[in-house]
Image (spheres, grey):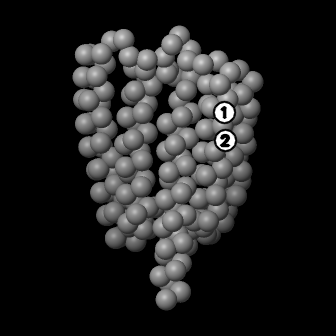
Amino acid sequence: MLVKVLEMIIFIMLLVAVWRMSRGKEQTKFNYDERQKEIIANGHKYGFYTAIIGNVVGFVILDKFTNMPVAADFIMCCVIFTALAVDVLYSIAKGAYYGIRNNWKYNSLLMIILGVFLEIGNISLFLKDGLIDGRLNWEYIGFPSGIFVLLAGIASVIKGLRSSKEDAE
């Protein structure tokens, strides 16, 4: 329980830090050109299709296999995070995740730190309590959310470094 409280406090502190740093600065406004808006729209479309397919597969799995060590809420949250990952990773890969003149280095580092804290918190909960009621359930939602945030941060770093290298050439 203490780990969850610490995780929530750290998450709130990170949210406040992002909010305070993004207030009133010209560089943090998200301005996108037409190409980026089209890429973002395609990312939303692919994420939506992923959510639909994932929900159908999740419902079939839940209907056919009732004794799984994974609860329905955990499966559905994994579907949501998978759809979000498709949307975000597509936008990052196509160069439209950050607006014009946004600080990708800071945002990427923040995502990686948050993802690491989410994973550490859930790993420590798992090592302390094991599976609650013998199933992965809502208590372990930090696993898929941490993986999602880490993937977004790492993909952002890779794309940012590639873009910087291409700009230097």
CA gap, disc 2 and disc 1: 6 Å
Closer to the camera, 137 or 12? 137
| Residue at the spot of label 2 | 117
Quickly name the residue at label 1: 121
For the question of whether residue 19 can be seen, the reply is no
Tell me if mark 1 has few (under 14), some (14-19) or many (20+) residues whose alpha carbon lies within 10 angstroms of its own. many
Residue 113 vertical placement versus 11 (above, below): below
Three-letter amino acid code at disc 1?
Gly
Residue 125 lies, in percent from the top left, at: 65, 25
Residue 9: quarter of image: top right
Instruction: Give the class, few, some or many, for how many residues have Cα within 10 Å of label 2's Cα (few <14, many ≥20).
Output: many
Q: Secondary structure at mark 2?
A: helix
Residue appearing at x 29%, y 50% in the figure: 46
The quarter holding residue 124 reads top right
Q: Residue at x 42, y 33 (%)?
A: 78
Q: Residue at x 40, y 63 (%)?
A: 93
State if disc 1 and disc 2 touch (CB < 8 Å): yes
Does the rendering let one see residue 26? Answer: yes
The mark found on residue 158 in the picture is: none
Residue at image x 70%, y 58%? 21
The residue type indicated by label 2 comes to Phe
Q: Quadrant of residue 118?
A: top right
